[in-house]
Image: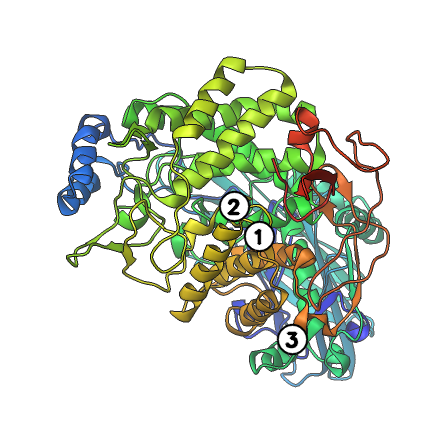
Amino acid sequence: MTVNATNDKLWYRQPAKDWNEALPIGNGRLGAMIFGGTSGEFLQLNEDSLWYGGPRDRNNPDALANLPRIRELILAGKLREAEDLALMALTGVPESQRHYLPLGDLELQNAAADGHFEQYERELDLGSGLAGICYAQAGIRYSREAFASCPDQVIALRLAADKPASLNFRVRWNRQQRRNMDGIRSWGTDGLVLSGQAGGEVGVDFRAAVKAVVKGGGCRTIGEYLVIEQADEAILYVAAATTFRSPDPERACKASIGEASRRSYEELRERHISDYRALYDRVQLDIADAGGEKAGLPTDERLARAKQGEDDPGLVALYFRYGRYLLIASSRPGSLPANLQGIWNPHFLPPWDSKYTININAQMNYWPAENCNLSECHLPLFELIERMREPGRRTAETMYGCRGFAAHHNTDIWADTAPQDGWTPSTFWPLGAAWLCLHLWEHYAFGKDEAFLAQAYPTMKEAARFLLDYLIEGDDGRLITCPSISPENTYVLPGGESGVLCAGASMDFQIMRALFEACLDSAGILGIDEPFRETLADALDRIPGTKIGKHGQIQEWMEDYEEAEPGHRHISHLFGLYPGEQFNAEETPELAAAARITLERRLAHGCGHTGWSRAWIVNFWARLRDADQARDNVLALLGHSTLPNLLDNHPPFQIDGNFGGNGGHRRDAAAEPPGRAAAASGMAGGLERRNGKRSSGQRRLHGRYGMVARTSRPCRYPRGPDRRLPDSGPWARACGAVRRGGTKLHVCGAIRRSV
């Protein structure tokens, strides 16, 4: 093992002391955190469908009857009365959705191990998806290798030593100090099966199985232990399943392990690597002089230096690669989407329930899916959105008397769409489904797959239909949302009273505009639904536009309120800058300038103190083409919000910052002026761009952390030799083009798509 020979590895000189130092592996459905101990090994395991409880209808039956009164109170400025009534009438019943659970722990205990060890190395190879450990103890060199195979749906752990008959260890299941499992049974003489029930009404049953295949020595079960003695080599196969997918999860586990163990370890390993590299190898990022002497240091030492302010472009590049690795490991076709912790959760009552927070966090998880050339990893999110339609219809009708489908700021494994929590700053926001549906349009914008668009359009239309019905007419004839909030912020009235509920927040109208335009474009491309297109066009004319406030900032609410927390972590009113495409220096310079002021004000008051918030800020600056600010905030993300294993620290761990920061690296492509960011150079390729273009020819980076794409396949849109496009029609609306000097030029990979 030569861990410092490549920039594609995280590596360390010591075992993990705690979860924040352990290394993640996953295949989308199964995940493990590997600690790499010398007295034994510890795998903290997850299976993506193991959640507490089953599906429920939590829609508040008293919502619709009280909705007119809540609107009346908001419009009359009686905020306390409106919020008090909303907390009773507009919360879910009960108020919380389901939460994600750990599968358990697989413990390996070495027999009579000498505590002293040397020559220790622990690594995660991003190029192959393999985790490895090696060390010397009592004159024997020990090694381990682990991976989570997607094609074979098992986790494999190989243990070896350079001296025959040197492996002596015991294997044991654990789950919450052995208190939260129903049974452990031997499976022949070489395996153990863990059984349990997730809890709650209609909760899933689960099984986990481990089987050993040894060379030399022997294997037997004693009680709840699997004992390996005097072996030359041992391979452990781990599988897990729940009744969410399998009517007989134990049979499913044994079948997966049976199929895997019939192959040689080398074949299983090669199948995993081939499957993994088919995704990972699509993108290359190489930075010249990537950290100099720091490139040979362990990852935690490099991170510690970065936290002290030292520059390390190679660590930034490693962080980018790690983000792609994590998305491949936590979201694959057939799995559930990556949740708030990806798939890696050790807690039985995890932070924010480790579910899907859809007022920014779940969306951020998938920001790198398309432009970082991992579109297949996007599919689990689309499947969840589709499952949300039926519950969302009930929510829309029962709570608001509306057609279409709606969701609030959270959902769970059961696609629950009723409001989550009883916390005014977040609960009463019914645009979760609308924002999620923009990911469907994003997928189409990159791949140009009209068959996919034809399937996705009805879902997008239903989300838009709800908003059309939910809007009310204000005194000036404009269409506004009421009640709503600007996620999770609070405003202050001139008299000093603070409030959360409002009639119209800027983010609402920005999301609405994006979704309505996506539906208009989709229907136009498909040549359908002319009456609905007219309805959307009429509504777009009556939706309030984004305003600039007294400080020169983008207003967060329809009125120019002061903020109770000027450095708030949510920057929702800049949705139109990113991930939206409504503000840009070329076409809306006033709004772009106001967005810059908004960012400067937020940062001056301490914004970016959470990992995901800082990642969003990176994307904002990249979209404003300010490479220096984007670079500084990438460094701040590493310096203040990154754990030793390079996972994002909210705190505590949330994976969204990894994915948001990863996406921000890509969006630095057109950041100008380069300034300090031009200090390093390198090559990037394989990154996806809208309109079906992919970068693959070599081209030099023009910024320290920016990436410039390379072109491999032609654009699918007609154009003449002068690259001119038609000024109207579907090609002009669908193509990524910008207008310069009155002429529409074909620049199909520009940083934004102009419609």
What is the three-letter code of the residue carrying label 2?
A: Gln
The disc label shown at residue 102, or none: none
Q: Are marks 1 and 2 in contact (CB under 8 Å)?
A: no
Q: Secondary structure at mark 1?
A: loop
Crowding around mark 3 (Cα neighbors within 10 Å: few <14, some 14 to 19, many 20+) is many
Task: Judge whether residue 32 can be spotted in this image.
Answer: no
What is the three-letter code of the residue carrying label 3?
A: Thr
Q: Secondary structure at mark 2?
A: helix
Q: Nearer the viewer, residue 405 or 472?
A: 472
Expressed as whole percent of the image width and height from the top left, the position of residue 376 reads 68, 39
Residue drawn at (39%, 40%) of the image: 508
Crowding around mark 2 (Cα neighbors within 10 Å: few <14, some 14 to 19, many 20+) is many
- Residue behind mark 2: 363
Residue drawn at (47%, 24%) of the image: 537
Q: Is residue 576 above or below residue 461?
A: below
Q: Nearer the viewer, residue 728 or 66?
A: 728
- Residue behind mark 1: 585
